[in-house]
């Protein structure tokens, strides 16, 4: 079996090479992203494995058809950048990695929240300068709070376990109830109830038409004063301008953002010494209690290994058996 893997970072190479050795399969690693030009390199391979945030060019799929390649296995969860109708029309089936490490995402969300509640960035900054005074950075304790989890799939559930471990009251909202959580009685019936009751709101929902800007000026108005908002899911779940307005008015106490609507081309690039090319992002970065990280919730050794291994396993299943539990049904 021969696989070509696009968009390979240095930190993925060791895992891909180990998989290749273990499975006695040829795995060609290329650092370029998969696009209408680089797809040519896939000629002669059985399947393509890829990861990128940029949209996949439509031209990729007729080229795959021409080369007789029927499988595209992506190394992440989100399929929002794939023209699925074009893939389907060209007989290309797609697999994803639905659960590379729910804990990785949930742990980053709570890390940001704890930084805000315990004011560690301020203390780190002060002590680095030799200032060891306490005031004014008094903290809040998470176990006194209600955490509202929006989206109770695998990642939401990992978060729920962590928040419960801290002793917080946890409530959840999801259009689909997770059977494992149903009996705990943590579900509220409406998003409005979650907005009204939560001190912390954490988003773990996919990017869909229905979810677009679910956090906006109207939903923020329904929240408690001093609410904390966490988004480690998808940037377009949240209207960043409305969040900024809520924060500047004092309604929102802080936010943890690992994703941003216009992050593509900015996150995982270096703008040191240059102006960050997005005015709203610059404004977010300038706020003390809005913590921005560049879509790194997934970026752990455990998750990256799973992304590589599971994508290659799924590609094998698709090529050998024509089916995989990770095939995305469009
Ligand atoms: C996904 O898996 O869809 C993610 O958001 C993580 C990605 C940046 C690798």
Image (tube, rainbow, N blue to C red):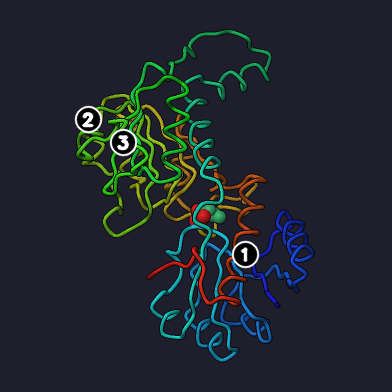
Residue bearing the label numbered 1: 313
- Distance Cα–Cα, label 2 vs label 3: 12 Å
Pick whichever of labels 2 and 3 is earlier in the sequence. Answer: 3
Query: Compared with residue 224, is residue 70 higher up or lower down, i.e. above or below?
Result: below
Specify whether 230 is left or right of 218.
Answer: right
Residue bearing the label numbered 2: 196
Please name the residue shown 64% across and 80% down the image. 46
Pick whichever of labels 1 and 2 is earlier in the sequence. Answer: 2
Is the residue marked by circle 2 packed among few (<14), some (14-19), or many (20+) residues within 10 Å? some
Q: Are marks 2 and 3 in contact (CB under 8 Å)?
A: no
Q: Residue furthest front?
A: 321
Looking at the rendered image, the quarter that the C terminus falls into is bottom left
| Res 22 → quadrant | bottom right
- Distance Cα–Cα, label 1 vs label 2: 44 Å
Residue 172: numbered disc = 3
Toward the viewer: 171 or 260? 171
Q: Quick one: SS at disc 2?
A: helix
Toward the viewer: 270 or 178? 178
């Amino acid at each position: 079996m021969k696989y070509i893997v696009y968009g390979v970072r240095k930190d993925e190479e060791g895992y891909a090479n180990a998989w290749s050795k273990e499975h006695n399969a040829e795995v060609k690693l290329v650092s370029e992203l998969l696009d209408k030009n680089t797809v040519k390199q896939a000629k002669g391979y059985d399947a393509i494995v890829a990861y990128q945030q940029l949209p996949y060019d439509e031209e990729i799929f007729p080229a795959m058809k021409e080369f007789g390649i029927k499988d595209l296995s992506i190394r992440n969860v989100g399929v929002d950048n794939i023209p699925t109708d074009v893939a389907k029309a060209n007989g290309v089936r797609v697999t994803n990695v639905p659960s590379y490490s729910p804990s990785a995402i949930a742990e980053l969300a709570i890390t940001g929240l704890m930084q805000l509640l315990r004011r560690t960035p301020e203390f780190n900054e002060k002590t680095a300068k030799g200032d060891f005074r306490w005031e004014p950075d008094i903290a809040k304790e998470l176990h006194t709070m209600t955490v509202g989890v929006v989206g109770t799939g695998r990642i939401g559930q990992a978060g729920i376990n962590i928040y419960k471990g801290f002793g917080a009251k946890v409530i959840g909202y999801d259009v689909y109830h997770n059977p494992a959580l149903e009996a705990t009685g943590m579900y509220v019936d409406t998003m409005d109830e979650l907005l009204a009751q939560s001190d912390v709101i954490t988003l773990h929902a996919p990017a869909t038409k229905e979810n677009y800007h679910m956090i906006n000026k109207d939903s923020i108005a329904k929240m408690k004063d001093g609410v904390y908002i966490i988004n480690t899911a998808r940037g377009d779940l949240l209207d960043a301008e409305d969040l900024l307005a809520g924060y500047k008015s004092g309604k929102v106490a802080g936010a943890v953002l690992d994703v941003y609507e216009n992050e593509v081309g900015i996150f995982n690039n270096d703008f040191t010494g240059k102006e960050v090319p997005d005015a709203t992002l610059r404004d977010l970065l300038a706020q003390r209690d809005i913590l921005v990280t560049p879509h790194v919730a997934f970026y752990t050794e455990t998750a990256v290994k799973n992304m590589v291994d599971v994508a290659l396993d799924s590609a094998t299943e698709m090529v050998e058996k024509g089916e995989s539990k990770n095939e995305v049904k469009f």
